[in-house]
Image: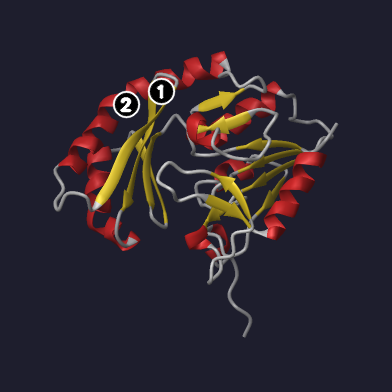
Amino acid sequence: MRPVFFSDLDDTVFQTARKMECPPRPERLAAEALNGSHSYMTAAQDMMMKWLLASTRFIPVTARSSEALGRCKLPFEDYQICTNGGVILTPSGTPDPDWHARMKEEADAVASGLENLMSFMARQTPAGRFRYWIVEDFGAGFYFCVKSNEDARRLDDIDAELCEVAGAALVRHRNDNNLSFTPAGISKRHAVQYLAEKLALDGSSVPVFGMGDSLTDLPFMAACDMLVIPKNSQIAQIKLCPEDG
């Protein structure tokens, strides 16, 4: 039995050239983007992924939809968790039917809340300052996402108002230029726990790793035996202990 590695992708396994060291040094194309903002791996990330894919059951855990996940260049062959946990793809590439039924019910219950966020953003001026959409997959809208077309700090202008519109049924998350609202019943952690039970990992001798960069990744990582955190990530910025001296 190989170790199981649940891992976030963006800003963990790869990142856009903008977020790489200056000057940008993209080593290998890792994922294509429709808007041209492709993602790349450094030489170290490339070596890490070759090692993990060869030695573990590597299972992506990503906010990407199944379509966006399909634009990744890495050879994922096991289960894949996508759409912020709203979808679990089987090794054959089809949605896990039981999980899909459960998550679609969760998504449908708050569909009006997601549409309210869309309507709020449509009223913002000047037009074109933000791009926003409901992330849909396999016939359901799973979460709302908004990004600034200018500086990421522009999201400060709408953050509090979006929280009011979202209400308690939608969970807010923000990391850099990404602000999202996801139904409370849909999460990466829930998906990881479901899959761990399906794969009979609980109580087994197989070590389970969780890797991610964002605070929204911490809950699913905490469901694993061991946590792996990239340096300079959002999680790594948390000061757990006073600085020496």
Mark carried by residue 110 = 2
The residue located at (55%, 46%) in the rendering is 217
193 relative to 105, above or below:
below
Q: Is residue 143 visible?
A: yes
Q: Which quarter of the image is occupied by the C terminus?
A: bottom right
Number of other residues with Cα within 10 Å of mark 1, as a class: few under 14, some 14 to 19, many 20 or more:
some
Asked if marks 2 and 1 touch (Cβ < 8 Å), the reply is yes
Number of other residues with Cα within 10 Å of mark 2, as a class: few under 14, some 14 to 19, many 20 or more:
many
* Secondary structure under the numbered disc 1 in the rendered image: helix
Q: Quadrant of residue 177?
A: bottom left
Q: Is residue 11 visible?
A: no
Q: How far from the left and from the top, in percent, is residue 26?
A: 59, 59
The residue located at (72%, 47%) in the rendering is 49
The residue located at (59%, 78%) in the rendering is 243
31 relative to 108, above or below:
below
Q: Which quarter of the image is occupied by the N terminus?
A: top right
What residue is disc 1 on?
Answer: 106
